[in-house]
Image (tube, grey):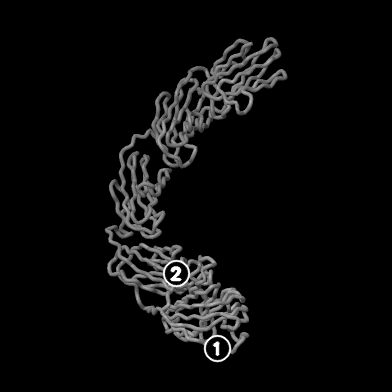
Amino acid sequence: MRFTGGIGVVVGGGLVLAGGVVGLLLAQTGALPQGGETDTDTPEVPSLTPGDTAEGELTTRSPYNPNSGSRYQRFRVEIPAGDVVTFELNTGFPGVLALYDERGNQMVTAQEGRPGTGCYRCSRHERNPVMTYRSTEGGVYDLTVSAEEADEFGPVRVETDTMSLDSDDRIVPEEAFPAWFDGDRTRLGFDVDTAGYYRVDLEAAHDIVALVANPGSSNPIERRAGADGRLSLYAWFDEGEQELALKDYGYRPPVPGIVTLEAHAVDTDAPAPADREATLRDGETTGFLQSDERVAYTLELDEASAVAIVVQASEFSPEVQLEGEQITLSAGPDWRTEDAIIEDAFPAGEYQLELAASQGTGGRYTVDVVTRAYDDDGDADLEPGVALQGRRHGERDSVHALVIEEAGHYIIDMESNDFDTYLTLTGDDVHIENDDGGEQYNARIHALLEPGEYEVVAGAFGQRERGAYTLEATAETLGDVDALRGPASLGDGESVAAVVPSGERNEHTVVIPESGEYRIELDAADFHAEMLLSGEGVEAYAPEGVTSVTRTPVMEESLEAGEYQLRVYPLVREEGGAYQLDISR
């Protein structure tokens, strides 16, 4: 064995793991190996001065640990009170570090590939366990180096670094501040000369540390370190002696170590959180978002308005949500500008705008609001022949009264280029719903309506869909409703014009006076049609086959004299409309 002096270089920062770890050289005892078998007399234990580097080799002649079956090597280390020493082990095999006090009690240990080693997410090819220990009282300690497995041997190298920490020191803005995190919760003093927003940067060797600003207040600000052990926290601090706190994120046993903090005053004229304007108005509102904070504003509209809200932030990616009057809209960073934009028309009312950071920790932002009057027919009455221009907001459907003065065949259309429309018609024993009865994703209802008052609900297939739409009711053919459905019976040589309402079917009795070959033709201008003829031992379909989609099905059958039932219905249930029916020989 040999060891040399030199200034150590720490890689991976200072991490520790208190208590025993299964598979370490001490196994379950947590005590320094005693009286193990050796092939030679126990050699004198060499000293390792913090800040130096020691080298050696594990061989079959090294001291034997009966607890794990591995060989180990010891170094004696003297650590002054308050000093922090970091040990890093370099080996060609998975190695273990452990530190014991003068009574043989294990103080800290580190093992490759486990939390607290500096290799928390490393591959099996990285053999650099890192261990950090702070001596509160000072003393002489034994450092042991061993392999995880009993049959692994080879050179070992231990590099060390040392640092003195004064627990009475306080954080001062613009100065780096090293602190000891005890693995549970550590409070740190922070002297603030000028009240304002501050950015506190933290650097640790692992990602299981969280920083808390104003921990004793009713509204503490907390942020967890990223995978690289770094974080930046933005928070408001009043003038005077303030506090920061470090806390672990649930690992047991806890992982102590050194962290470095640095606080910087933020140059901004944004108001303090308590002084923010609660109500948004036309124009620009400036603010500052603290880490993991959600800021709420009120937007009041005295009349239906077209509103454009643009949130800009250079230090985080903004996301906003506007809610009120049964409307909920949200927006994240636009892929072109990185701004969060809500632009739509809204009915009069009170709305809540909530702002947060989808990515990033916080910082300055501006909310720019522009409103203008908007002519929205809203829930106005629907008159036949008069188109309404409306706008759907979030989950809110528009409800329109429809007064029918003359019976007849009416068509109700709802069209939009912005969303998938959905119509509902109710009243006077009528209930019809339609999604795609019109072109593309537009809704259309064919209805035979008696005089009376009906209700039309203009909605969307998806609850949160929104955008502009046109709604119109058209009187297609006026007349007796029963007559418009077509005659109850018809015979050879007759031609019938009829209407089938959306989602329904018509039935006709076909009277065949004498046996023969007959041709039944259906011409449906408004829908994809299907016919079913049954009776006198015959059951025939047109068109034949489920893949045959047509508006003009034809049926040619050899029929005996008698009566048959002919059903006419849309192939797509939601469709309907007018059709022409002809029977000939």
Residue 277: x %, y % from top left:
31, 54
* 77 up-or-down from 318: above or below: below
Q: Is residue 15 visible?
A: yes
Disc assigned to residue 80:
none
Which residue type carries mark 1?
A: Pro
Q: What residue appears at the point 62 percent right and 80 percent down from the top-left corner?
A: 67
Total labels drawn: 2
Secondary structure type for disc 1:
loop
**Pointer 1: what residue?**
43
Secondary structure type for disc 2:
loop
Q: Label 1, label 2: how many angstroms apart (C-alpha)? A: 36 Å
Which residue type carries mark 2?
A: Ala
Residue 233: x %, y % from top left:
38, 63
Whether residue 284 sits left or right of residue 382 in the image: it is left
Instruction: Assess whether mark 2 and mark 1 are in contact (beta carbons under 8 angstroms).
Output: no
**Pointer 2: what residue?**
205
Q: Nearer the viewer, residue 457 or 209?
A: 209
Q: Nearer the viewer, residue 519 or 65?
A: 65
Q: Is residue 498 visible?
A: no
- Asked where in the image residue 379 lies, by quadrant, the reply is top left
Quadrant placement of the C terminus: top right
Q: Nearer the viewer, residue 504 or 337?
A: 337
In the rendered structure, which disc, 1 or 2, sits on the residue that comes first in sequence?
1
